Amino acid sequence: MKQTTPVSRSGRFAGGPAADVAEFTESISFDRRLWRQDIAGSMAHATMLRQAGLLTQRELRAILRGLDAIGREIKAGKFTWQSELEDVHMNIEAALTRRVPAGAKLHTGRSRNDQVALDMRLWLRDQLVELLGETRLLQRALVQLGEREQGVIIPGYTHMQRAQPVYLAHHLLAYVEMLARDSQRLQECLARVNVCPLGSGALAGSTLPLNRELVADLLGFVDARGCPQVTQNSMDAVSDRDFAVEFCSSAALLGVHLSRLAEDLVLWSSTEFNFIRIADAYTTGSSLMPQKKNPDVAELIRGKSGRMIGNLVALLTLLKGLPMTYNRDLQEDKERLFDSADTVRATVRLCAAMLDHTQVNRESCRAAASDPALLATDLADYLVRKGLPFRQAHHAVGALVALAERLGKPLDQLSLAELRSVEGKFAADALRVFDLGQAMARRELTGAPGTREVGKQLARWKKLTA
Ligand code: ARG
């Protein structure tokens, strides 16, 4: 049996684990991306150890210098990661101790269990800040497209059947609203991520006089008023991964929202709809059919939501029934979290870029929106204004739709006599209902796709996303 000797085995063990065990249990292949956070956490911890009298000033200086040098080496790609050292924490600590004898004091009052929880929170905090900015840019791209095409009207659909006319901007602003709620969720997640677990030790804190608030303060774990935020239960702090679940959940929902937008774009760019043209740079060709231009970016945005849902389910499954406190199962959290963060951020960025490179075919939109059947409900509302109960009005207009179909003409081409043959309350002004411009002006309620209201909402979002 081939054996290796990692540092965590010192003392207790006669030899290292079997080679295939090391390979099975390592996390360095994926957690090395936490190196920045690991070094920042260690620097803050060491600074606190000095204040607690557990390091001399000289030891602290040596540790900080050593960590800084390691950080520069990693950044330059010159650091040798050793898989027998298992994870990012032990790789960095071992490298430090090789250079600086005081490195052996760095782990005082600390466990990898609170260290890894710290690193992940620091990492996720940065990701959340970036994602929130990117989400705002996506909202801005939607608002700008809506503004550029402010007068464009398209059919709104239910059951994928033409229903009522809406401004294209109104349709796009629906996604801006979804993204606003996604951002709120991410903000709330950020507040719960931003709590420092260091000082929780392996599971039961430490007998040493550590200053948790100082570490929290040094690492920016503070609330809006600048008060340090530290976890309040050591067992919870080392075994809780709610913050990762919450993030993966919010990311999955954001991804699901974008999958719907992507599906709209796929449909709209088809020859059947022809509402939009996505720039060549955001489409691909077919290896066989020379005429094809496929909306692959939109399709992948739709598809990527699947892996984010998968990551969420994987994390929840990982945590279900896990006994207190830290168990090695938790190492499986990182790839899911990393993947969700990478995926959601790429999806948001690509979606914004694609929208910036999408043109609207106003003529096709106009042709589709001029289908008079879209205003059948307006015709029923006309009868309601004339005093007819809505159910009767609905029935009368339904009969007119059937009549027009039988006569083979559009709804707005029926004569007054034909209208009156179904319902006597129709007068000469009835057909004015089919003036699309006026129909859009009449939709005045808050949240309705009316001309004034959509203008108001566009202005509101333009300001909010500026
Ligand atoms: N690589 C581990 C993880 O990702 C770090 C914590 C290990 N702790 C331990 N007691 N083995 O969870």
Image (cartoon, rainbow, N blue to C red):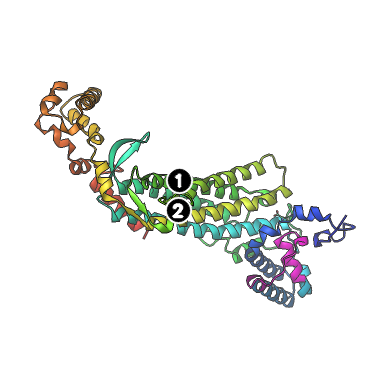
Figure check: 37 above or below 232: below
Instruction: Tell me the residue that label 2 is attached to.
Output: 285
Is 316 positioned to the left or the right of 162 in the image? right
User: What residue appears at the point 46 percent right and 51 percent down from the top-left corner?
Assistant: 286
- Local secondary structure at mark 1: helix
Most extreme residue toward the right is 14
- Local secondary structure at mark 2: loop
Instruction: Tell me the residue that label 1 is attached to.
Output: 257
| Region in magenta | 73-97
Dots 1, 2 in contact, CB < 8 A: no
Check residue 176 for magenta coloring: no
Type of the residue with mark 2: Gly
* Displayed quadrant of residue 338: bottom right
Camera-side mark, 1 or 2: 2
Q: Position of residue 296 (x, y in %)?
A: 46, 51
* Displayed quadrant of residue 270: top left
